[in-house]
Amino acid sequence: MTTTRSTHGPDDIAIIGWSISPMVRNTDKTEVQMLLEVITGAVTDAGITRKEVDFTCAGSCDYVAGQAFSFVQNIDALGAWPPKRDSHVEMDGAWALYEAWVRLLLGDIDVALAMGSGRSSTADPALIYSMEMDPYYLAPLGADATSLAAIQARVLIDSGKVSERQMAEVAVRCRRDAKTNDHAQVAGDFDAATLLAGEYVRAPLRKHDLPPITDGACAVVIARADKARELCEHPVWITGFGHYSEMHNPGMRDLTSSPSTTLAAKAAGVDERPVEVAEIQSAYTHEEPLLVEALGLGADVAINPSGGPLASNPIMATGLVRVAEAARQIRDLGRHRTLAHATSGPCLQQNLVCVLEGDPS
Amino acid sequence: MRMRPSEERVEALARTVESTIRFPYKRSLGPVLGAFMTALTEQRIIGIRSGTRVIVPPLEWDPQTAEELAHDFVDVGPAGAVTSWSWVAKPTSQHPLDRPFAFALVKLDGADTAILHAVDAGSIDAMATGMRVAPRWKAKRKGHITDIDAFVPGEQPVVADDDEGPAAEPVTMMEYDAAITYNTPVTPNVERAEKATDEGRFLGLRCPVCARTYTGGKGYCPVDAVELTPENELDLPQIGTVTNYTIITPVQYPGQTETEPFARVHVWLDGTDVVLGYQPLLDTPNDDVRIGMRVAAMWASDAEKADNDARAESNLVGWMPTGEPDVTDPDLANRIC
């Protein structure tokens, strides 16, 4: 974990372009082709070409791709000739952005690109994600992400922190907000009572409490201050960036809170000035109130106006999409200060917070 | 920039290739997990002391302080209380039970943390937070988390009549054998390339930016990062030069049909950038394989195709020396891709 503050100096780093792919249940594209499109989209959005990108970092997962070292093939989407400085994280693209941001802080290069990609449709997510659990105590039980999320949901329900009705209302709001999001897979007008009449998938979670299965990718271009101002009329400054992790096994944690989220929010300076919009990686409905509390956000903060991961959930890119959506709120929709949150691991084990600000108007 | 779904290429989903990948891991357990797994074979569940707390299942380090823990084990349970649970109506192939069950966090008596396991309660109506459960032991235990078949409602552990008793030796290793079936789409470019090889042609793709050529099936130029489409297709020559080679001494594994050392050569197709790797070389003793040899593609005849092994990837049989003089470019050896 590290973080920084905006000092309006050369070490300030801004988002200058991004691209989000179509979000679909089943793509006919390879992961390379999905990345090819979003990288072209992001550098075009930033007004540059691939040649001007000094460092790239990708977030993807071999278990999702069904291929060892799948990120090596994905480099084909970069145009890495002459060779580029490149890195990879077996994590959501939000952590790739974190690495790219740290790399730019070194000061010797100006432009970096982070990406995240995943094609969850190729296999059963319930079989894939248990592979990422503790290999001694959890994976051999086939402990899938949704079963573990349901256990956390019940802890929150039993403690009185959330109710199944409140969870359904989160789904209703996200699906309604998603109606204006071109990338949403799940959008429309629903009512909580109807949703609550549905069957449990993993009690106490019903279908509306779960994210859709999504194929998709996202790319974000960042630049150091001088370059950002040269290239971009409205740079979106990264003014705080932090991530913290808790222990892995959910049976050893207090599942009614998310202390790593609170620490990351503190490190990123969330509470220093008001936040208008938060794009958070709440892939399950019950996670939203828990994260909002852990982030210290008031009722006046708009949560996931894009519809969030409940509208489309491209695993390995979902967190990076949150950053792009939070940046869009500033550059395209006139907000001043937003935050993006990403999570990884069972029951919100690891959490990342990125605070974004526009130039003073 | 946002790409709208309507801009996405609308095409019927191409066929997919199904592949099942197995992950047959063997893991060493070390002194702490090994002790836990060994205890399971003895129908005991142990935790490890960390200060005043007892961590179950035991860890080697305190998860909060990262201090290495002394191997101070303590028996817990065997019964305990469910602290939370989820009901799995449709189990997956990786789950411990093949009928509806609960995943539960169970705080065993004497433990300060909860262990995740299955509860075989028969019905969601039999589940409740706080309910008491006890382990049902498998008759044959090997030192594995699934030696506990599941927890069941009540205070008393369940032991089978044909219980086989504890492991003869301390358990030091465990196996974890998962399998995932993937369905990967075959892209239109790959389909066209496969059709071409069926017809005895090499389909190439020429990048409209840099004019490099690639073998068919490539969907993009990795140098310029542009998509390659049917407009960029061309037939590649069927004659080339060996740029490098290897002589493989076969080891026997499933699917290996070779028994004697054999050559695989890299062939640079004339007038292109395409190097085909690891190609069979025909009618040539291993001692005669040379960098610079001129070779031509040999395709299976229709009769041979009918006899073809169903697993054969194409009807390219291999490469036949043409008898032309060798090419003597010292840089050839560097062209392996």
Image (cartoon, rainbow, N blue to C red):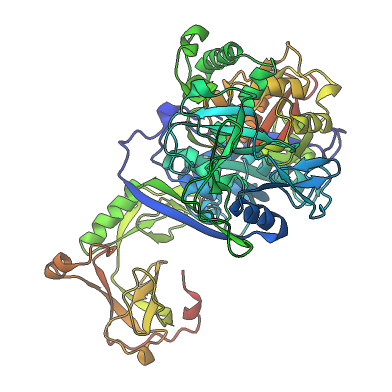
Place of residue B296 in the rendered image (x, y in percent of width and height, measured from the top left): 28, 76
Is residue B194 shown left or right of residue A228?
left
Q: What is the x, y in percent for residue A147?
A: 55, 32
Residue B29's image quarter?
A: bottom right
Q: Quadrant of residue A228?
A: top right
Give the image quarter of residue B260.
Answer: bottom left
Judging depth in this view, the residue of B45 and A317 nearest the camera is B45
Q: Which residue is at the front of the view, B102 or A230?
A: B102
Q: Position of residue B50 (x, y in %)?
A: 82, 45
Q: Is residue A315 above or below residue B84?
A: below
Q: Residue at x 63, y 56 (%)?
A: B38
| Rendered location of residue A229, percent (x, y) | 75, 34
**Which of the image's four quarters has the N terminus of chain A?**
top right
Examine the rendered structure and indicate whether residue A254 appears above or below residue B204.
Answer: above
Looking at this view, name the residue that lies furthest to the bottom: B287
Vertical order, A338 against A252 (above or below): above
Depth order, front residue of B336/B13? B13
| Near-viewer residue (B292 or A95) | A95
